[in-house]
Amino acid sequence: MIKQQDVNNFINGQIILSNQARMEIISPIDGSAISSLPMSQKSDLDKAVEAAQKAFVTWSEKTLKDRVQVFFRYRQLLENNLEELAELVRIENGKTMDEAKAEVFKSMELCEFAVSMPQIVTNEIQEVSKGVECRIERKPLGVIACITPFNFPNMVPHWTVPNAIVLGNTVILKPSELVPLSAMRMAELLKEAGLPDGVFNVVNGGKEIVEAICDHPDIKATSFVGSTRVAKIVYKRASSNLQRCVALGGAKNHLIVLPDANLEMTANNVVASMAGCAGQRCMAASVMVGVDNIQHIINKMIEEAKKVIPGENLGSVISKEAKERIERYITEAEAQGAKILIDGRNAFVKGFENGFYVGPTIIDFVTPDMAIAKEEIFGPVIAIIRAKDVDEALKIENNSNYGNAASVFTESGAMAKRVMEGASAGMIGVNIGVPVPREPFSFGGWNESKFGVGDITGKSSIEFWTQNKKTTTKWNPEDKRDWMS
Ligand code: NAD
């Protein structure tokens, strides 16, 4: 892969060289080092927070209508630079160019929601008794932090950053150390769009920076997206330091497939959901619960999965460790008696022999007690569990510790309704493999897929990134007063 510039930090509108120890950035496409980033320390974060605090004074005083102007221009810059931004995602994350472009398109949509804030955030006012008015205004929190994962280097930062900034906050972004290139480009483009220095800062690094964010007394709120293991650490640590926190974790999404489901559409959707972005989506199908006799659908899925070719329409997984972990789960399920219908182990891509590829994998006759049925695999793998009816299927789904998404495939409205009501997940799909709610609807799971109140995007995020100021005014003269005045 073509070498990229070394990554540093972006603080107060400038790229700040860091003299901390550096880590290589490996492109999963071919396993080559494409750049390096600093493992920043608390002192680097302190500088970013200081800049963000200073910027907050003037940024928060601007009107909402003023603040969104930057994002009209920035959204256009995303569009103008689509090819370049998608290429960055592709080389650092390993997904296909089409998937990388879709990510940037979604970032544009997220900006479109952010610029619509003046139409939504109109505050409230009422004359509560004669001459007395109460008003509620949404005010920003101050300096906030966003910690993001590797799987959507461009999109996930856009879940939080545009909304938080237009609502008047100033931001520290800590991207995944595996994919910092997109975040640095985001900083440059925001500056080009006219965002004042210090409003958006990027501090690169790993665990140390995340811990320093959670402990920082001047950071008012932290959003986290990543694995459940780390989401729990971040949620507990940030909350115990009295920060507002929402932490999104991992997933194990169940698709419940009934025999009457549309054959072509269901097979297409299930395979696309489990293999898209190499299965590295928190909304990816991971378990398919086949109700009664769905053999015809499985046969069609096998046909579809054979069309998914690593290195062509299937990208790489993120790392050597990820490839080994995914293959280990497959091998263990096989040893426990599950039947591998399509085997993605030992995938080989000519010319990219050192890349980290796993082919699409369909495993049948998985039982609910197997690790492959319970744990997040995060690869292009689907485990099929057989159930006799919808009640049993729902019981299996309800037993998961996670609860990001669940979908049902059927032609029956009554059965669909049963799953819509009975599934224990925050995002439900009917005949949809990846049921991501689009703006203005908000994104967020249940159970161990999310910790904290409210969702991370859409209207729900307005509550998270602001605090209410309640003002009561009384201007009426004495003779106009009633008992409450
Ligand atoms: P991760 O939890 O390993 O890393 C996320 C962030 O936490 C990174 O910035 C990383 O530097 C930091 N981090 C890692 N280990 C840490 C530690 N011990 N202490 C403090 N900080 C630490 O997640 P990942 O592997 O980058 O991303 C994949 C995971 O993210 C999957 O579990 C996926 O389901 C989840 N995810 C969830 C959603 C959602 O909406 N629920 C969306 C995208 C990804």
Image (cartoon, rainbow, N blue to C red):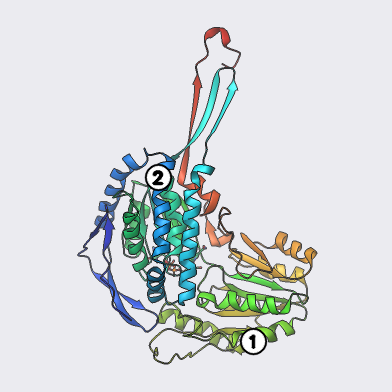
The picture quadrant where one finds residue 9 is: bottom left
96 lies left or right of 431? left
Which mark lies nearer to you, 1 or 2? Answer: 2
22 lies left or right of 95? left
Q: 356 or 105, which is in the foreground?
A: 105
User: Is 137 above or below relative to 43?
Assistant: above
Q: Secondary structure at mark 1?
A: helix
Q: Residues within 10 Å of mark 1 (few under 14, many from 20)?
A: some
Quadrant containing the N terminus in the rendered view? bottom left
226 lies left or right of 418? left
What residue would you read off at disc 2?
67
Q: Quadrant of ligand 1?
A: bottom left
CA gap, disc 1 and disc 2 = 50 Å
The circle drawn on residue 302 is: 1
| Residue type, numbered disc 1 | Ile
Q: Which residue corresponds to the image point at 75% horizontal and 71% vertical from the top-left?
A: 410
